[in-house]
Amino acid sequence: MRWIIRSLGLLATLLVLAIGALFLMPADRIAGLVESRFEAATGRALTIEGDVRPGLWPEIGVKTGPITIADADWAGTAPMVAAEGLSVGIAWTGLFGGDIRVTGVELTRPVIRLARAADGRGNWELAAASAPAAPDGRSESGGPSIALDNLTISDGTVSFTDAGARPITLTGIDATLTLPDFAGEAALTLNAEANGVPLTAELSIAQFARFLSDGAVPVALTAGIGEGTLEFDGHAGLAALAAEGRILADLDGIGPLTRAAGGMASALPEGLGAERVFLDSAMTFAGDTLSLRETSLQLDQNQMSGEIDLTLAEPRPKLVAQLSAGALDLSGLSGGGEEEEIASASDSPEGWSTEPIDVSGLGALDADVALDAQSIALSQSQLGRTRLRLALENGRLVTTIRELKAYDGAVTGQVVVNSRGGLSASADLAGSAIAISRLFAELLDFDRLITLGDMEISVLASGNSMDALMNGMNGEGSFRFGAGELLGLDLPGMIRNLDPGFIGEGKATIFDEVTGTFRIVNGVVINDNLKMTAPLFTANGSGEVSLGGRRLNYRIVPKLLSGEGEGISVPVLITGTWAAPKFRLDLESMVDAKAQAEIEKARDKAEAKAKEKLLEKLGGGADAEDAAKDKLEKELSKGLKKLFK
């Protein structure tokens, strides 16, 4: 703002001073005079093309053809300012040594390119700029102040590039600035587009000279961003950019604001500001940090309150916040609402989705956010009291669960999602008194195990889709389930009757406890120490559960404890898909085991009879028994040698 007023004021003064010579020298000589004086005063080359046309009544006026102002030598070869024409009017009183009153300045189709280098230099900083202004708008040397009745920009363009980043561009600018007294109030109205987003603004700045130089002065802003509005009422200063006051924003989603600021607006899920962002807060901005206090924030249907700090630092902005909320609805995070199950995410009941998971948004900023919510609704889950800390740094998000009421129990631990070089995720979680049926139904699409239990799990997976993550998972864990039932299988009835038909609707296996540990290798859960106790039986189990293939290959060996069939033990094989598992009695292994037992029994009987005959031959007694034992071993040895010849 300062350089615009100073440069236009200087240019207007030079043009007016040339009026006296207008009738004595040709237009090109007048343009050359103004150009040389401007470059001497600012260090930048000014080029005026076409005629310089004077006007003397009712005010001193000058119109030019196209003009350009050169850019800083480090900022490129394109001009910093280019306009199709400039028109300046100055009151006669300023011609005779008083304060300069510019009655009108009009820039036609100006293109203004602003840039800031990595070292903080701005191309608008003029090397030979005039002395700084005093609070009344005069220079420290006591020169005249400048008043501006009306500055008009028609169909202008302004772009700003910060250290090579994506430029912020305003196009179609129609703006009017009034500054009747340089030390008094300035008023600006603006209509423009920022990267295709319509913008409007009405800005009022009290004590304009102090705003530019050394103080925070009253400022009021009402702006429109797309269909949304933004209001600020407080104090601000430009010399060391700072602001303090109340901010009120009601935006039609975060998308228009992101696009206007030069970013790529990704599609946010409902609940995170896809449709509406409402903010009411006490704001301060100093240096590169925006602070919001006494904040009321609404993202779509979700309302929160707390404190927020946003630091606009390199290489990424950083968000620090402490937020509290009532009931949050984040069901839109699944991408499919209630119609799509998170667990399967696939058109096939036996497969996971191979659609790429986009986590590029994790690299947009760093964050350290503490959230305390009374409840959180997800697409398939309803969480109770939730206290989380989310730490995001360079695309790696660490979520620490301080408190989480879920599945009728409690969960603690940590979840990491890392987008550096592809997607990877890990979880170290412990759950107590968890409703296992609900947990397995939502995560694994398996709802046949009705019980409360404790679980611990530590897993790591990598891949850019759900299919890759589930097939690439590795880790370990343990479980202990309390009294409950396994639906779809009557295990005691199956063993007692040696009938695999005790499955299906209405069948169940009642148990007292189930315990075990497991390891996960490339998406396959391996367990070899399952123990189940029940009123009618005990059982051991081992086998595999394929997370990637969503299939079962498990063997349970139950043993009846009482009633008809007491002592019977028949292995049960569970195979097939999670959605339609198959149960089969492993009768072959039972026959093999029985045959082996008969073989062992026959061998023991044969050995006893052979020993008895030897004792009879040797006469009995301890010595005879030892001798018989030695002779029997020798005979067995000879037999083995013959067997393997």
Image (cartoon, rainbow, N blue to C red):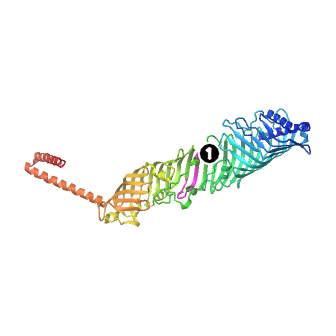
Between 464 and 39, the residue placed more toward the observer is 39
Q: Which residue is mark 1?
A: 319
Q: Residue at x 45, y 60 (%)?
A: 447
Q: Position of residue 264 (x, y in %)?
A: 63, 49
Asked if residue 107 lies left or right of residue 559, the reply is right
Pointer 1: residues within 10 angstroms few (<14), some, or many (20+)?
many
Direction from residue 329 to residue 234 in the image, left or right: right
Which of the two residues, 15 or 347, is positioned nearer the viewer here?
A: 15
Q: Is residue 632 magenta?
A: no
Given the image, on which type of amino acid does mark 1 rest? Answer: Leu
Left or right: residue 146 versus residue 629 is right
Q: Quadrant for the N terminus, please.
A: top right
Is residue 501 at all visible to an observer of this figure? yes
Could you say which quadrant of the image residue 27 lies in?
Answer: top right
Q: Is residue 562 above or below residue 256?
A: below
Question: Is residue 367 part of the magenta span, yes or no?
Answer: yes
Q: Position of residue 318 (x, y in %)?
A: 62, 43
Question: Can residue 130 be spotted in the picture?
Answer: no
Q: Nearer the viewer, residue 345 or 317?
A: 345
Q: Position of residue 132 (x, y in %)?
A: 79, 35
Residue at point 22% right, 57% down?
Answer: 598
Secondary structure under tag 1 reads strand
The picture places residue 360, in percent across and down from the top left corner, at 57, 48
Q: Main secondary structure of the magenta part?
A: strand
Left or right: residue 583 compared with residue 312: left
Q: Which residues are magenta?
A: 363-385
